[in-house]
Image: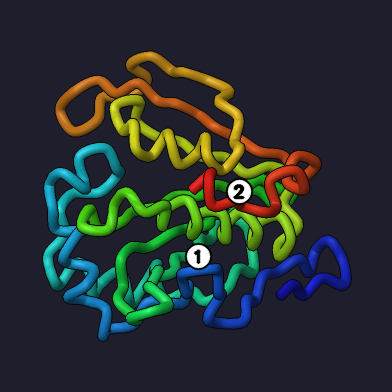
Amino acid sequence: MIDVSSEQQRELHPTYPIRTERLRLRPLTPDDVNALLAYRSLPDVCRYVPFAPMDRQQVLDRMATIWANTGLTDEGQALTLGVELAASGALIGDVILFWHSREHLGGEIGYVFNPDHAGHGYATEAAHAMLRLGFEGLGLHRIIARLDERNGASANVARRLGMRQEARLVHNEFFKGEWSTELDFAMLAEEWPSHRELPAGRR
C-alpha cells in the first residue's frame, strides 16, 4: 500500500478496490456520473460543503482533473474515491483524503453521501478506511476533519471515528451568504491504534 524508501519518496499507491465489511472504495469513472448527480446535485447535500449543486458537465470536469488521481505523490494533492455497496455495486457516496503537508505529515478527510443511504453507518465505515490509508498507507502524523457546526450528521461521523473535537471557530467564514461556525476534529497517529477497529456499534 505504501512506497517509502526515504522521507522524500513518501507516496501512497493503494490497491483497488479497498474493501471494508460492507463497502468497496475505488477511483471514480465516467460510468458513475448518474450516481454522483443523484446526490451532488441536491441543494440539501451541498448546503454545508464547499461546493454548489453540480450538473453533469461539472461532474465530468472534476473527473478529468481533481478526481483523476488514483494515488498521492506529493503534498497539496487529494485522493477522491467512490464508495459502493459490496452487495450490489451501487455507488452511494464519495470520500476524500487530502495531503496537506509533507514536512508536518498532515492530512484531512471529507465525505459526501447520498441521503437515500443515510442511517446505516456507511459514511463512518468509508471514512474509517480513509483514516487507515492516511495513517498506515501514507504514514501521516495528524489527520483532521473540518465541518460546519450545523452539519450534525457529519460531526457525528467524526465522533464515531474517535476523532477529538479541538476547536469551535465562531463565524470564521462568510459561507454561501451567511456566517458559518466551523468545528475542527483531529486524530494523531499515536491515537489511531485505539480506533483501528470499528465496532458495529460505533458506525
> Left or right: where does residue 144 sit relative to residue 146?
right
Residue 51 picture location, percent across and down: 25, 49
User: 49 and 195: which one is in front?
Assistant: 195
User: On residue 79, which mark appears?
Assistant: 1
Residue in view at x 72 percent, y 52 percent: 140
> Left or right: where does residue 148 sit relative to residue 138?
left
Amino acid type of disc 2?
Gly
User: On residue 107, which mark appears?
Assistant: 2
Residue 85 picture location, percent across and down: 38, 73
Residue lying at the far front in this picture: please name it.
Answer: 201
Name the element at disc 1.
strand
> Left or right: where does residue 152 sit relative to residue 38?
right
> Is residue 141 visible to us here?
no
Q: Are marks 1 and 2 in contact (CB under 8 Å)?
A: no
User: 12 and 203: which one is in front?
Assistant: 203
Vertical arrangement, residue 173 with respect to residue 15, above or below: above
Residue 78 picture location, percent across and down: 50, 61
Residue in view at x 78 percent, y 69 percent: 9
Report the quarter where the N terminus lies. bottom right
Vertical arrangement, residue 161 with respect to residue 120, above or below: above
Quarter-of-image position of residue 33: bottom left
Residue in view at x 47 percent, y 69 percent: 22
> Left or right: where does residue 40 sit relative to residue 161?
left
Residue in view at x 57 percent, y 61 percent: 129
